[in-house]
Amino acid sequence: MIITDIIQKKKEKIELSQDEISFFVNGYVKGDIPDYQISALLMAICLNGMNEEETFNLTMAMRNSGDVLNFNDCNRKFVDKHSTGGVGDKTSLVLIPLVASCGVGIAKMSGRGLGHTGGTIDKLECFKGFNSELSSKEFMRLVRNEGVAITGQSDNLAPADKLLYALRDVTATVDSIPLIASSIMSKKLASGADGIVLDVTYGSGAFMKDAKSAMQLASLMVKIGKKAQKNVSAVISNMNQPLGYCIGNSLEVVEAINALSGNGPDDLMKLVYTLGSHMLIMGEVVDNTDDAYKLMQNAISDGSALEALKNIISAEGGDISYISDTDKFDKAKNSYECICHKSGYICHLDALKCGHVAMRLGAGRIKKGDKIDLSAGIILNYKVGDYVKPGDKLSTLYSNYDITDDIISDFKNAYIISDNNQVNEKLIYDVVN
Protein backbone atom coordinates (compact mmCIF):
# COMPACT_ATOMS: atom_id res chain seq x y z
CA MET A 1 0.00 0.00 0.00
CA ILE A 2 1.02 3.62 -0.57
CA ILE A 3 0.01 6.31 1.93
CA THR A 4 -0.62 8.91 -0.81
CA ASP A 5 -3.26 6.61 -2.33
CA ILE A 6 -5.03 6.43 1.05
CA ILE A 7 -4.91 10.23 1.41
CA GLN A 8 -6.31 10.59 -2.11
CA LYS A 9 -9.20 8.21 -1.36
CA LYS A 10 -10.25 10.10 1.73
CA LYS A 11 -9.83 13.41 -0.09
CA GLU A 12 -12.35 12.07 -2.62
CA LYS A 13 -14.71 10.93 0.18
CA ILE A 14 -14.15 7.23 -0.57
CA GLU A 15 -14.45 4.74 2.32
CA LEU A 16 -11.15 3.36 3.62
CA SER A 17 -10.83 -0.39 4.13
CA GLN A 18 -9.81 -2.03 7.41
CA ASP A 19 -6.43 -2.94 5.88
CA GLU A 20 -5.81 0.64 4.73
CA ILE A 21 -6.64 2.03 8.17
CA SER A 22 -4.39 -0.54 9.91
CA PHE A 23 -1.62 0.28 7.43
CA PHE A 24 -1.50 4.00 8.18
CA VAL A 25 -1.95 3.58 11.96
CA ASN A 26 0.81 0.95 12.27
CA GLY A 27 3.05 2.79 9.81
CA TYR A 28 2.82 5.98 11.84
CA VAL A 29 3.55 4.22 15.14
CA LYS A 30 6.62 2.51 13.62
CA GLY A 31 7.86 5.79 12.15
CA ASP A 32 7.55 4.59 8.55
CA ILE A 33 5.02 7.31 7.65
CA PRO A 34 6.00 10.94 8.40
CA ASP A 35 3.97 13.56 10.28
CA TYR A 36 3.23 15.64 7.18
CA GLN A 37 1.45 12.79 5.40
CA ILE A 38 -0.58 11.76 8.46
CA SER A 39 -1.45 15.46 8.94
CA ALA A 40 -2.86 15.57 5.40
CA LEU A 41 -4.90 12.44 6.07
CA LEU A 42 -6.23 13.77 9.37
CA MET A 43 -7.36 16.97 7.67
CA ALA A 44 -9.10 14.94 4.94
CA ILE A 45 -10.88 12.92 7.66
CA CYS A 46 -11.78 16.10 9.54
CA LEU A 47 -13.30 17.65 6.40
CA ASN A 48 -14.93 14.57 4.83
CA GLY A 49 -15.67 12.41 7.88
CA MET A 50 -15.71 8.67 8.40
CA ASN A 51 -18.65 6.29 8.47
CA GLU A 52 -19.34 4.00 11.44
CA GLU A 53 -17.39 1.06 9.97
CA GLU A 54 -14.32 3.21 9.30
CA THR A 55 -14.49 4.75 12.78
CA PHE A 56 -14.75 1.31 14.39
CA ASN A 57 -11.77 0.03 12.36
CA LEU A 58 -9.73 3.12 13.33
CA THR A 59 -10.62 2.58 17.00
CA MET A 60 -9.55 -1.06 16.93
CA ALA A 61 -6.33 -0.32 15.04
CA MET A 62 -5.38 2.24 17.70
CA ARG A 63 -6.41 -0.09 20.52
CA ASN A 64 -4.28 -2.90 19.06
CA SER A 65 -1.23 -0.65 18.60
CA GLY A 66 -0.10 -1.45 22.16
CA ASP A 67 -1.02 -3.46 25.25
CA VAL A 68 -4.61 -4.59 25.76
CA LEU A 69 -5.27 -5.22 29.45
CA ASN A 70 -7.75 -7.69 30.91
CA PHE A 71 -8.85 -8.58 34.42
CA ASN A 72 -10.58 -11.88 33.69
CA ASP A 73 -8.71 -13.52 36.58
CA CYS A 74 -10.25 -11.12 39.14
CA ASN A 75 -13.39 -11.97 41.11
CA ARG A 76 -15.28 -8.77 40.25
CA LYS A 77 -16.54 -6.81 37.27
CA PHE A 78 -14.50 -3.81 36.15
CA VAL A 79 -16.14 -0.63 34.89
CA ASP A 80 -14.39 2.42 33.45
CA LYS A 81 -15.60 6.03 33.24
CA HIS A 82 -14.63 8.84 30.89
CA SER A 83 -15.67 12.47 30.61
CA THR A 84 -15.24 14.55 27.46
CA GLY A 85 -14.24 17.43 29.75
CA GLY A 86 -15.49 20.61 31.29
CA VAL A 87 -14.90 23.39 33.81
CA GLY A 88 -14.93 22.50 37.49
CA ASP A 89 -15.36 18.83 36.56
CA LYS A 90 -14.02 16.99 39.57
CA THR A 91 -16.52 14.15 39.07
CA SER A 92 -13.92 11.34 38.92
CA LEU A 93 -12.45 12.37 42.29
CA VAL A 94 -15.83 11.68 43.89
CA LEU A 95 -17.20 8.96 41.63
CA ILE A 96 -14.23 6.55 41.52
CA PRO A 97 -13.78 6.06 45.29
CA LEU A 98 -17.56 6.06 45.79
CA VAL A 99 -18.21 3.30 43.25
CA ALA A 100 -15.12 1.35 44.36
CA SER A 101 -16.38 1.40 47.95
CA CYS A 102 -19.58 -0.23 46.68
CA GLY A 103 -17.70 -3.19 45.18
CA VAL A 104 -17.06 -2.32 41.53
CA GLY A 105 -13.53 -2.76 40.18
CA ILE A 106 -11.98 0.37 38.65
CA ALA A 107 -8.91 0.48 36.40
CA LYS A 108 -8.86 4.17 35.49
CA MET A 109 -6.60 5.82 32.95
CA SER A 110 -6.92 9.59 33.33
CA GLY A 111 -5.41 12.60 31.61
CA ARG A 112 -4.02 16.04 32.34
CA GLY A 113 -5.81 19.30 31.72
CA LEU A 114 -5.32 21.29 28.54
CA GLY A 115 -6.64 24.79 27.96
CA HIS A 116 -9.84 25.57 29.85
CA THR A 117 -10.58 21.94 30.81
CA GLY A 118 -9.14 20.38 33.97
CA GLY A 119 -7.42 17.00 34.30
CA THR A 120 -7.86 14.36 37.00
CA ILE A 121 -4.13 13.55 37.11
CA ASP A 122 -3.20 17.18 37.86
CA LYS A 123 -5.73 17.24 40.69
CA LEU A 124 -4.46 14.02 42.23
CA GLU A 125 -0.92 15.40 42.20
CA CYS A 126 -2.07 18.01 44.73
CA PHE A 127 -1.49 15.18 47.24
CA LYS A 128 2.21 15.32 48.10
CA GLY A 129 4.01 12.18 46.87
CA PHE A 130 1.20 10.88 44.65
CA ASN A 131 2.65 8.84 41.75
CA SER A 132 0.52 9.31 38.64
CA GLU A 133 2.96 7.58 36.27
CA LEU A 134 2.57 3.92 37.18
CA SER A 135 4.14 1.27 34.96
CA SER A 136 1.68 -1.17 33.38
CA LYS A 137 2.96 -3.87 35.74
CA GLU A 138 2.50 -1.71 38.87
CA PHE A 139 -0.91 -0.54 37.67
CA MET A 140 -2.10 -4.12 37.15
CA ARG A 141 -0.73 -5.14 40.57
CA LEU A 142 -2.62 -2.35 42.32
CA VAL A 143 -5.85 -3.09 40.48
CA ARG A 144 -5.65 -6.78 41.38
CA ASN A 145 -4.72 -6.14 45.03
CA GLU A 146 -6.82 -3.06 45.78
CA GLY A 147 -9.63 -3.37 43.24
CA VAL A 148 -9.03 0.22 42.10
CA ALA A 149 -6.21 2.37 40.71
CA ILE A 150 -5.90 5.64 38.78
CA THR A 151 -2.95 6.46 36.55
CA GLY A 152 -1.90 8.55 33.57
CA GLN A 153 -1.93 6.97 30.13
CA SER A 154 0.85 4.42 29.79
CA ASP A 155 3.18 4.65 26.78
CA ASN A 156 2.20 1.06 26.01
CA LEU A 157 -1.55 1.68 26.06
CA ALA A 158 -2.94 2.79 22.68
CA PRO A 159 0.33 4.51 21.66
CA ALA A 160 -1.18 5.31 18.25
CA ASP A 161 -3.78 7.50 19.95
CA LYS A 162 -1.10 9.34 21.92
CA LEU A 163 0.81 10.13 18.71
CA LEU A 164 -2.26 11.00 16.65
CA TYR A 165 -3.76 13.21 19.37
CA ALA A 166 -0.54 15.23 19.69
CA LEU A 167 -0.59 15.75 15.92
CA ARG A 168 -4.29 16.66 15.86
CA ASP A 169 -3.67 19.24 18.57
CA VAL A 170 -1.25 21.19 16.36
CA THR A 171 -3.04 20.72 13.01
CA ALA A 172 -6.53 22.01 13.93
CA THR A 173 -8.06 18.54 13.54
CA VAL A 174 -9.28 17.98 17.11
CA ASP A 175 -12.94 18.81 16.44
CA SER A 176 -13.86 15.77 14.34
CA ILE A 177 -16.47 13.44 15.83
CA PRO A 178 -14.98 10.23 14.29
CA LEU A 179 -11.50 11.21 15.52
CA ILE A 180 -12.77 12.12 19.00
CA ALA A 181 -14.80 8.90 19.28
CA SER A 182 -11.96 6.64 18.12
CA SER A 183 -9.46 8.41 20.42
CA ILE A 184 -11.61 7.96 23.52
CA MET A 185 -12.80 4.44 22.78
CA SER A 186 -9.38 3.08 21.76
CA LYS A 187 -8.06 3.88 25.26
CA LYS A 188 -11.18 2.63 27.01
CA LEU A 189 -11.19 -0.67 25.08
CA ALA A 190 -7.47 -1.15 25.75
CA SER A 191 -7.89 -0.67 29.50
CA GLY A 192 -9.69 -4.00 29.93
CA ALA A 193 -12.96 -2.92 31.57
CA ASP A 194 -16.09 -5.04 31.25
CA GLY A 195 -18.25 -1.91 30.97
CA ILE A 196 -17.72 1.76 30.12
CA VAL A 197 -19.77 4.76 31.29
CA LEU A 198 -19.24 7.99 29.35
CA ASP A 199 -20.05 11.53 30.49
CA VAL A 200 -20.48 13.42 27.22
CA THR A 201 -20.65 17.12 27.99
CA TYR A 202 -22.07 19.93 25.88
CA GLY A 203 -22.28 23.71 26.23
CA SER A 204 -19.92 26.68 26.40
CA GLY A 205 -17.39 24.87 28.62
CA ALA A 206 -17.32 21.63 26.57
CA PHE A 207 -15.86 20.58 23.22
CA MET A 208 -19.37 19.77 21.96
CA LYS A 209 -21.18 23.11 21.94
CA ASP A 210 -24.76 21.81 21.60
CA ALA A 211 -26.79 18.81 22.72
CA LYS A 212 -27.25 17.53 19.16
CA SER A 213 -23.48 17.20 18.62
CA ALA A 214 -23.06 15.56 22.03
CA MET A 215 -25.79 13.04 21.18
CA GLN A 216 -24.09 12.28 17.87
CA LEU A 217 -20.75 11.65 19.58
CA ALA A 218 -22.34 9.61 22.39
CA SER A 219 -24.30 7.42 19.98
CA LEU A 220 -21.20 6.71 17.90
CA MET A 221 -19.13 5.71 20.95
CA VAL A 222 -21.90 3.45 22.26
CA LYS A 223 -22.10 1.74 18.84
CA ILE A 224 -18.32 1.25 18.81
CA GLY A 225 -18.49 -0.33 22.27
CA LYS A 226 -21.35 -2.61 21.29
CA LYS A 227 -19.51 -3.80 18.19
CA ALA A 228 -16.46 -4.49 20.39
CA GLN A 229 -18.76 -6.55 22.65
CA LYS A 230 -18.56 -4.14 25.57
CA ASN A 231 -21.39 -2.75 27.67
CA VAL A 232 -21.41 1.04 27.15
CA SER A 233 -23.70 3.84 28.37
CA ALA A 234 -23.36 7.57 27.76
CA VAL A 235 -24.84 10.32 29.93
CA ILE A 236 -25.30 13.66 28.14
CA SER A 237 -24.64 16.47 30.65
CA ASN A 238 -24.84 20.26 30.52
CA MET A 239 -21.58 22.26 30.79
CA ASN A 240 -22.93 25.76 30.11
CA GLN A 241 -21.91 26.73 33.66
CA PRO A 242 -19.10 25.28 35.82
CA LEU A 243 -19.82 22.08 37.74
CA GLY A 244 -19.87 22.65 41.49
CA TYR A 245 -18.50 25.82 43.08
CA CYS A 246 -14.73 25.38 42.67
CA ILE A 247 -12.51 25.72 39.60
CA GLY A 248 -8.81 24.90 39.88
CA ASN A 249 -6.86 21.87 41.01
CA SER A 250 -6.46 21.96 44.81
CA LEU A 251 -9.73 23.89 45.19
CA GLU A 252 -11.57 21.12 43.34
CA VAL A 253 -9.85 18.42 45.39
CA VAL A 254 -11.11 20.05 48.59
CA GLU A 255 -14.63 20.23 47.12
CA ALA A 256 -14.41 16.52 46.21
CA ILE A 257 -13.30 15.63 49.75
CA ASN A 258 -16.25 17.61 51.12
CA ALA A 259 -18.57 15.79 48.70
CA LEU A 260 -17.34 12.39 49.90
CA SER A 261 -17.90 13.65 53.47
CA GLY A 262 -21.56 14.37 52.69
CA ASN A 263 -21.32 18.07 51.78
CA GLY A 264 -21.24 18.02 47.99
CA PRO A 265 -22.91 20.61 45.72
CA ASP A 266 -26.28 19.50 44.33
CA ASP A 267 -25.25 19.53 40.66
CA LEU A 268 -22.03 17.61 41.26
CA MET A 269 -23.79 14.96 43.34
CA LYS A 270 -26.61 14.58 40.83
CA LEU A 271 -24.08 13.85 38.08
CA VAL A 272 -22.06 11.53 40.34
CA TYR A 273 -25.13 9.53 41.35
CA THR A 274 -26.36 9.30 37.75
CA LEU A 275 -23.02 8.03 36.42
CA GLY A 276 -22.49 5.85 39.50
CA SER A 277 -25.85 4.11 39.13
CA HIS A 278 -24.90 3.01 35.61
CA MET A 279 -21.51 1.79 36.85
CA LEU A 280 -23.02 -0.21 39.72
CA ILE A 281 -25.56 -1.85 37.42
CA MET A 282 -22.87 -2.68 34.84
CA GLY A 283 -20.69 -4.01 37.63
CA GLU A 284 -23.56 -6.34 38.65
CA VAL A 285 -23.55 -4.99 42.21
CA VAL A 286 -27.22 -3.94 41.92
CA ASP A 287 -29.86 -4.39 39.24
CA ASN A 288 -31.78 -1.09 39.45
CA THR A 289 -31.23 2.63 39.89
CA ASP A 290 -33.03 2.95 43.24
CA ASP A 291 -30.79 0.36 44.89
CA ALA A 292 -27.73 2.00 43.33
CA TYR A 293 -28.63 5.41 44.81
CA LYS A 294 -29.24 3.91 48.26
CA LEU A 295 -25.94 2.04 48.19
CA MET A 296 -23.97 5.16 47.20
CA GLN A 297 -25.71 7.36 49.75
CA ASN A 298 -24.96 4.82 52.48
CA ALA A 299 -21.29 4.65 51.40
CA ILE A 300 -21.00 8.41 51.89
CA SER A 301 -22.91 8.52 55.18
CA ASP A 302 -20.97 5.63 56.77
CA GLY A 303 -17.59 7.00 55.66
CA SER A 304 -16.59 4.10 53.41
CA ALA A 305 -16.45 6.30 50.27
CA LEU A 306 -14.01 8.73 51.90
CA GLU A 307 -12.00 5.78 53.21
CA ALA A 308 -11.78 4.46 49.63
CA LEU A 309 -10.25 7.79 48.53
CA LYS A 310 -7.66 7.48 51.29
CA ASN A 311 -6.81 3.95 50.12
CA ILE A 312 -6.36 5.10 46.50
CA ILE A 313 -4.11 8.02 47.49
CA SER A 314 -2.08 5.96 49.96
CA ALA A 315 -1.58 3.00 47.57
CA GLU A 316 -0.08 5.37 45.00
CA GLY A 317 2.30 7.11 47.40
CA GLY A 318 0.20 10.16 48.30
CA ASP A 319 -0.02 11.82 51.72
CA ILE A 320 -3.53 11.10 53.05
CA SER A 321 -3.16 13.58 55.92
CA TYR A 322 -4.31 16.22 53.38
CA ILE A 323 -7.76 14.57 53.41
CA SER A 324 -8.33 15.12 57.12
CA ASP A 325 -6.58 18.51 57.09
CA THR A 326 -7.35 20.30 53.82
CA ASP A 327 -5.52 23.41 55.04
CA LYS A 328 -2.31 21.56 54.09
CA PHE A 329 -2.98 22.12 50.39
CA ASP A 330 -0.96 25.00 48.94
CA LYS A 331 -2.61 28.41 49.11
CA ALA A 332 -2.24 31.14 46.48
CA LYS A 333 -0.57 34.39 47.59
CA ASN A 334 -3.05 36.71 45.85
CA SER A 335 -6.84 36.88 45.85
CA TYR A 336 -9.57 39.16 44.51
CA GLU A 337 -13.20 39.28 45.64
CA CYS A 338 -15.75 39.89 42.87
CA ILE A 339 -18.57 41.97 44.40
CA CYS A 340 -22.08 42.22 42.94
CA HIS A 341 -23.30 45.72 41.99
CA LYS A 342 -26.94 45.07 41.04
CA SER A 343 -29.94 43.08 42.23
CA GLY A 344 -31.42 40.23 40.24
CA TYR A 345 -31.13 36.59 39.29
CA ILE A 346 -28.02 35.09 37.75
CA CYS A 347 -29.36 33.86 34.42
CA HIS A 348 -26.00 32.98 32.85
CA LEU A 349 -22.54 32.03 34.15
CA ASP A 350 -20.38 31.24 31.15
CA ALA A 351 -18.27 28.12 31.80
CA LEU A 352 -15.83 28.83 28.96
CA LYS A 353 -15.07 32.35 30.23
CA CYS A 354 -14.60 30.99 33.76
CA GLY A 355 -12.27 28.31 32.42
CA HIS A 356 -10.20 30.81 30.45
CA VAL A 357 -9.88 33.08 33.48
CA ALA A 358 -8.80 30.15 35.66
CA MET A 359 -6.20 29.25 33.04
CA ARG A 360 -4.83 32.82 33.05
CA LEU A 361 -4.67 32.71 36.84
CA GLY A 362 -2.31 29.74 36.45
CA ALA A 363 -4.71 26.80 36.93
CA GLY A 364 -4.50 25.48 33.36
CA ARG A 365 -2.20 24.89 30.41
CA ILE A 366 -2.17 26.75 27.14
CA LYS A 367 -0.03 23.99 25.60
CA LYS A 368 1.05 20.52 26.71
CA GLY A 369 4.04 20.63 29.04
CA ASP A 370 3.17 23.99 30.59
CA LYS A 371 3.66 24.10 34.36
CA ILE A 372 0.46 24.80 36.25
CA ASP A 373 -0.17 26.39 39.64
CA LEU A 374 -2.09 23.80 41.67
CA SER A 375 -3.31 26.47 44.12
CA ALA A 376 -4.78 28.86 41.52
CA GLY A 377 -8.44 29.03 40.61
CA ILE A 378 -11.88 30.38 41.42
CA ILE A 379 -14.41 29.78 44.19
CA LEU A 380 -17.99 30.67 43.21
CA ASN A 381 -20.54 31.64 45.85
CA TYR A 382 -23.58 31.92 43.58
CA LYS A 383 -24.65 30.15 40.40
CA VAL A 384 -27.38 30.25 37.77
CA GLY A 385 -30.82 30.76 39.30
CA ASP A 386 -29.55 32.38 42.50
CA TYR A 387 -30.80 35.82 43.55
CA VAL A 388 -28.05 38.36 44.31
CA LYS A 389 -27.98 41.97 45.52
CA PRO A 390 -25.39 44.78 45.72
CA GLY A 391 -22.57 43.96 48.12
CA ASP A 392 -22.86 40.19 47.76
CA LYS A 393 -19.52 38.43 47.15
CA LEU A 394 -20.10 36.59 43.87
CA SER A 395 -16.77 34.77 43.87
CA THR A 396 -13.07 34.91 44.72
CA LEU A 397 -10.13 34.60 42.31
CA TYR A 398 -6.86 33.03 43.52
CA SER A 399 -3.40 33.20 41.93
CA ASN A 400 0.29 33.46 42.65
CA TYR A 401 0.48 35.91 39.73
CA ASP A 402 -0.85 39.47 39.73
CA ILE A 403 -4.62 39.44 39.20
CA THR A 404 -4.81 42.17 36.58
CA ASP A 405 -7.72 44.45 35.70
CA ASP A 406 -8.26 42.74 32.33
CA ILE A 407 -8.57 39.32 34.00
CA ILE A 408 -11.11 40.76 36.45
CA SER A 409 -13.04 42.41 33.63
CA ASP A 410 -13.14 39.19 31.60
CA PHE A 411 -14.39 37.26 34.61
CA LYS A 412 -17.17 39.74 35.38
CA ASN A 413 -18.32 39.33 31.76
CA ALA A 414 -19.04 35.67 32.51
CA TYR A 415 -22.09 36.75 34.55
CA ILE A 416 -25.44 37.96 33.26
CA ILE A 417 -27.85 39.17 35.95
CA SER A 418 -31.53 39.66 35.06
CA ASP A 419 -34.69 40.86 36.76
CA ASN A 420 -36.43 37.61 35.86
CA ASN A 421 -35.51 34.06 36.81
CA GLN A 422 -36.41 32.27 33.59
CA VAL A 423 -33.55 29.77 33.36
CA ASN A 424 -34.69 26.19 32.86
CA GLU A 425 -31.68 24.15 31.75
CA LYS A 426 -31.42 20.52 32.82
CA LEU A 427 -28.10 19.15 34.08
CA ILE A 428 -28.78 15.68 32.61
CA TYR A 429 -30.01 16.05 29.05
CA ASP A 430 -30.33 12.38 28.07
CA VAL A 431 -28.83 8.91 28.35
CA VAL A 432 -27.72 6.73 25.42
CA ASN A 433 -27.54 2.98 26.08
Image (cartoon, grey):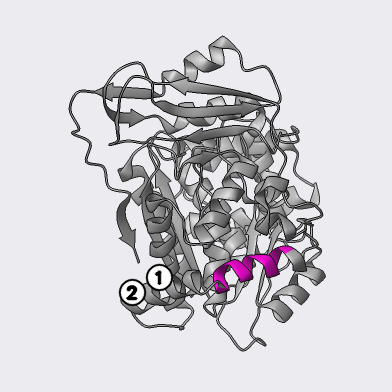
57 or 385, nearer to the observer: 385
Q: Residue 380 appears at what percent x and percent y? A: 46, 35
Q: Circle 2 is placed at which residue position? A: 289
> Secondary structure of the magenta portion, mostly?
helix
Judge by depth and name the residue closer to the eye, 139 or 124.
124
Q: Quadrant of residue 166?
A: top right
Which amino acid lies under the numbered mark 1 shown in the image of this protein? Ser
Q: Residues within 10 Å of mark 1 (few under 14, many from 20)?
A: many
Can I make out residue 87 in this image? no
* Res 96 label: none
Q: What number is the disc on residue 277? A: 1
Residue in the foreground of this view, choosing between 294 and 135: 294
- Residue extent of the magenta highlight: 304-313
- Left or right, 57 with reference to 279: right
In the visual, does 106 lie left or right of 53?
A: right
Q: CA distance from mark 1 to mark 2?
A: 6 Å
